[in-house]
Image (cartoon, rainbow, N blue to C red):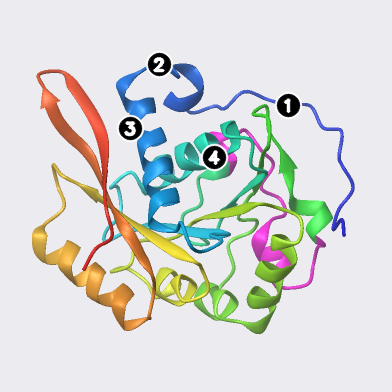
Amino acid sequence: MTLFKKKKKPLQKAARKLITVDNTKSIISEQFRTVRTNIHFSTADNDLRSILITSSSPSEGKSTCAANIAVVFAQEGRKVLLIDSDMRKPTMHHTFRLNNGTGLSSVLTRQAEIADVVMDTAIENLHVMPCGPIPPNPAELIGSQTMKALIEQLKLEFDLLVFDAPPLLSVADAQILSNECDGTILVVDTGSTEKDSALKAKETLQSANARILGVLMNNYALAKDHYYYQYYGTSE
């Protein structure tokens, strides 16, 4: 069953640098592929179809990580949809130079169809659903039956859904959505995230019965002037 027709749109290069596209042989790109491999290992007996990427606080790099994780899964040959579910401070339309006139919020408020908001990218197998106009009630839309139905519809068309969600300790959106996704990855900035904030974020996910796949350590100093991303196994 096909939910939308293939659209012939001009494909633009990403406006923001995606290391997994621009430098596939870098140590950072390799770490993102390690993230992908570890996700496979952590879900060997289950069909993982949706992943939520979030953080405890703003500016920890979760949107950049979400985009690069979506890219490495697409490079593997899976048909991936990256969904900007941060309906407070969306960024994916900037990253991929897309029109944000319609998007997720438009579908949830029944002002657009799925076919109108799923965008092609220059990266093979990777599609993006931008946020759309910022609504006055993001949490209500995220927790609606319409959102649940949308996720099930999208799973008919795509192999993997990757959600970029708002920070956990700022608003309730990510906590609500984590319960609807097959797995959640918590991004932690090793240079700025406080331990108490990371632990509180973990507890917030656990209270929502989210399946925490692991923690992605962002901006970890490997050596002078070198940084990499490291993924650790299932959190307990």
| 154 or 130: nearer the viewer | 154
- How far is the residue under mark 1 from the one under mark 3? 27 Å
Residue drawn at (66%, 83%) of the image:
145
Residue under pointer 3: 31
Mark 4: amino acid = Phe
Q: Residues within 10 Å of mark 1 (few under 14, many from 20)?
A: some
- Pinpoint residue 30: horizontal percent, then vertical percent: 36, 27
Mark 3: amino acid = Gln
Q: Which mark is residue 25?
A: 2
Residue drawn at (86%, 53%) of the image:
4
Overall secondary structure of the magenta section: loop
Of the numbered discs 4 and 3, the one sitting upstream in the chain is 3
Q: State the extent of the magenta-drawn residues as a range.
A: 93-113
Q: Is residue 119 one of those drawn in magenta? A: no
Q: Residues within 10 Å of mark 4 (few under 14, many from 20)?
A: many
Residue drawn at (59%, 68%) of the image:
135
Of the numbered discs 1 and 2, the one sitting upstream in the chain is 1
Residue drawn at (50%, 76%) of the image:
139
The nearer-to-camera label among 1 and 4 is 4
The kind of secondary structure element at disc 3 is helix
Q: Kindly check if marks 1 and 2 are in contact, taking CB atoms under 8 A apart as contact.
A: no
The nearer-to-camera label among 1 and 3 is 3
Count the numbered circles shown.
Answer: 4
Give the quadrant of the C terminus: bottom left
Residue 76 in view (yes/no) = yes
| 176 or 80: nearer the viewer | 80
